[in-house]
């Protein structure tokens, strides 16, 4: 049986800071090892997004100007994106993408951009400061440590029905105050990690790949395939 994962690269032509597209390349790298094919498609301004057409999605980071452009288009995709998220399909949303899935984002000039409220976090403005540098967190459920690079002006606060991706060991994370980094709701992961997150954190990537596969092929027993793929570490 040939298995395939169809990836939606949300606004990949606008939101792709620090090579966030590397998340898709990493998914393909691990999928290759178990004979799973990965196809990807940019879904951008005025494109139709249908939850049923995709098994995995990546929404990268961006600068404030691009976020302003995307904020105008995103409401058209809101219902299908919420459907995708609630179907438990993996969505990796990085930095600007993470901010836009929440309630709102206040940019560096103080402009408040509405998010689509697919998740309950919100992002306030930091005054004349950015959080820049290497970051390390620990996922409290698995004990795994994740490494990344952050560069953001916005400071994010978690809402109900979401928990952090990890506890900050080094760096700033969501807001520099509460030691949380990222947000998890179902299989949607919001994070400030560039790097890209999947390339630098093999365990995380493999976990997300099998979540997508299990979701798409619920009757298949993945036990043996799981032994065939080993995480790279960087
Ligand atoms: N423009 C947003 C901020 O500065 C997101 C930045 C990013 O995606 N790296 O917070």
Image (tube, rainbow, N blue to C red):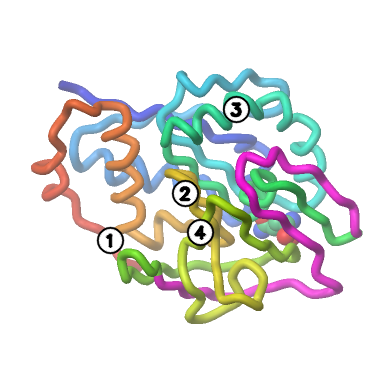
Residue 123 magenta-highlighted: yes
Mark number, residue 22: 2
**86 in relation to 143, above or below:** above
Evaluate if marks 1 and 2 touch, with contact meaning CB atoms under 8 Å apart. Answer: no
Residue holding disc 1: 232
- Region rendered in magenta: 110-138
**Residue where numbered disc 4 is placed:** 163
Secondary structure at numbered mark 1: loop
Residue 188, image x and y in percent?
48, 45
Image location (x, y in percent) of residue 68: 81, 43
> Mark 3 sits on what residue?
43
Ligand 1 quarter of the rendering: bottom right
**Marks 4,3: beta carbons within 8 A:** no
Mark 1: give few (<14), some (14-19) or many (20+) Cα within 10 Å: few
Asked if the residue under mark 3 is in contact with the one under mark 1, i.e. CB atoms within 8 Å, the reply is: no
Counting from the top left corner in percent of width and height, residue 196 is at 49, 57
Q: Earlier in the sequence, mark 1 or mark 3?
A: 3
Q: Which of marks 4 and 1 is nearer the N terminus?
A: 4
Locate the N terminus and report the quarter of the image it occupies.
top left
Q: Is mark 1 within 8 Å of ligand 1?
A: no
Is 68 on the left or on the right of 165, as rendered?
right
Mark 3 falls on what kind of element?
A: strand
Mark 3 CB in 8 Å range of ligand 1?
no
Q: Disc 3 and disc 2: Cα gap in Å?
A: 17 Å
Residue at image point 46% right, 58% down: 197
Answer few, some or many: residues within 10 Å of disc 4's Cα (few below 14, many 20 plus, some between 14 and 19). some
- Dot 3 or dot 2, earlier in sequence: 2
């Amino acid at each position: 049986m040939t298995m395939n994962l169809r990836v939606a690269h949300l606004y990949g032509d606008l939101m792709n800071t620090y090579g966030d597209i590397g998340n898709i390349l990493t998914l393909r790298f691990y999928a290759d090892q178990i004979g799973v094919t990965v196809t990807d498609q940019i879904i951008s301004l005025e494109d139709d997004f249908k939850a049923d057409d995709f098994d995995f999605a990546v929404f990268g980071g961006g600068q404030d100007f691009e976020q302003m452009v995307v904020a105008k288009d995103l409401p058209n995709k809101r219902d299908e994106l919420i459907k995708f998220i609630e179907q438990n399909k993996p969505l990796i949303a990085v930095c600007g993408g993470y901010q836009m899935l929440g309630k709102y984002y206040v940019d560096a000039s103080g402009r408040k951009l509405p998010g689509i409220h697919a998740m309950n976090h919100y992002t306030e403005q930091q005054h004349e400061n950015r959080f820049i540098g290497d970051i390390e967190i620990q996922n409290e459920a698995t004990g795994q440590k994740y490494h990344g690079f952050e560069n953001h002006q916005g400071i994010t606060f978690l809402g109900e029905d979401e928990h952090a991706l990890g506890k900050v060991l080094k760096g700033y994370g969501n807001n520099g105050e509460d030691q949380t980094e990222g947000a998890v709701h179902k299989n949607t992961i919001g994070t400030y990690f560039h790097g890209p997150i999947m390339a630098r954190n093999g365990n995380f990537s493999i976990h997300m790949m099998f979540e997508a596969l299990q979701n798409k092929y619920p009757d298949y027993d993945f036990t043996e395939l799981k032994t065939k793929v080993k995480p790279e570490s960087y």
